[in-house]
Every structure is written in structure tokens, then in C-alpha cells.
Image (tube, helix red, strand yellow):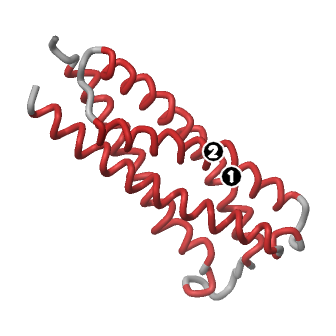
Amino acid sequence: MKKNIYLDFAYFIILAASLGGVITLGAFVAPVVFHTDRIVSEILIDNYNAGIIMGEIFHRFSYWIYFLAVFVALYEAVSYKTGFRDSITFGSAVMVIGTSLMFSAVYAPRILEMQAMGKEATQSDTFNNIHIASEIDFKILAVALIVLFVRRLMLLRTV
């Protein structure tokens, strides 16, 4: 059975764009937002307000992440049904879907909820633990996206 090259191309673009978004937000945007004191001297943003800004950025990115999870689930289900099965792609797709949903449906909303409670709530151990877990989740998502992209590309070459 021949694969749809346009669907495959769209899949690779979505995986690559998602990885680009994860890397951009995690490695470039967050460090800049949380360290304005190193960039500007006249307008300083404290960690609480920087967190509010980053929270909104991640909230908006969550919509893309939801789309990613749905697209990966549908693409991989169709691929599985049509015989393009592989345990590495299955495992990495499950990781992409799971970490995407954890980030968008659990971590980001919980962080925003605690930020809405005020500065004191964001200085609690609970907030810190949720924040650390969300960072780990984001890193796992990045690795899973890389593995899924590379493995699907390898499998596509064999078709």
C-alpha cells in the first residue's frame, strides 16, 4: 500500500515546527523573560511578573500542543492500520501524545491557576514541584519529537 506523500510531508512539518517551538520557548524565550535584568536596566520585571508573561506564552502554545497530540494520534493510528508499524515510532508517539497532554491539560493550567492566586502561591513548594515537573515534561517532549521525526523519516525511506 502506497503512503500519501502530502500527509507524510505535513506530518514532518508539524513535528519539526513543534520541536522548534519547544526549543525556542524553553531555550530562548524563557531565559530572556526571566532575566530581563541582564538585558535592560531601566525596566526590570520580577520573577512573578515574568512568570505571568511566560504563563501566557505557554498557555497560547498549549493550543498548538493539543493540535500536535491529535495529529500525531490520527497519523499514527492510520499508519498502524495500514501496516506501517514500528515499536520505536509507537513508543515515541505515545510519549509525544502523553507529554503534550500532560503539559497542556495539567501543568500549564495548574501553573496559571496558582499564579492567579497571587505571588505567595508561586513561592510554595507545590508550585515549585509543578514547575520542575513541567520543565521535565517539556524536555521529554523534545526528545520524543526528535525520535519520532527521525524514526518516521527512516521508515519512509524504506517504503
Label 1 secondary element: helix
Which percent across, then down, holds residue 151? 23, 42
> Most extreme residue toward the top, as rendered?
1
Q: Which mark is residue 108?
A: 1
Vertical placement of 127 versus 56: above or below? Answer: below
Q: CA distance from mark 1 to mark 2?
A: 6 Å
In this rendered view, identify the residue nearer to me: 28 or 117: 117
Q: Dot 2, crowdedness within 10 Å: few (<14), some or many (≥20)?
A: many
> Most extreme residue toward the front, as rendered?
87
Q: Amino acid at mark 2?
A: Ser
Q: Dot 1, crowdedness within 10 Å: few (<14), some or many (≥20)?
A: many
> Most extreme residue toward the left, as rendered?
158
Q: Is residue 116 left or right of residue 7?
A: right
Q: If the image is split into quadrants, where does the N terminus sit?
A: top left
Residue marked by disc 2: 104
Q: Residue at x 82, y 53 (%)?
A: 113
Q: Is residue 154 left or right of residue 70?
A: left
Query: Is the Cβ of the residue at disc 1 closer than 8 Å to that at disc 2?
Result: yes
Q: Is residue 84 left or right of residue 19?
A: left
Q: Residue at x 30, y 37 (%)?
A: 87
Residue 74 found in image quarter: top left
In this rendered view, identify the residue nearer to me: 109 or 78: 78
Vertical placement of 63 versus 135: above or below? Answer: above
In this rendered view, identify the residue nearer to me: 139 or 30: 139
Label 2 secondary element: helix
Q: Residue at x 50, y 28 (%)?
A: 70
Which percent across, then down, holds residue 4? 22, 17
Which percent across, then down, holds residue 125? 79, 74
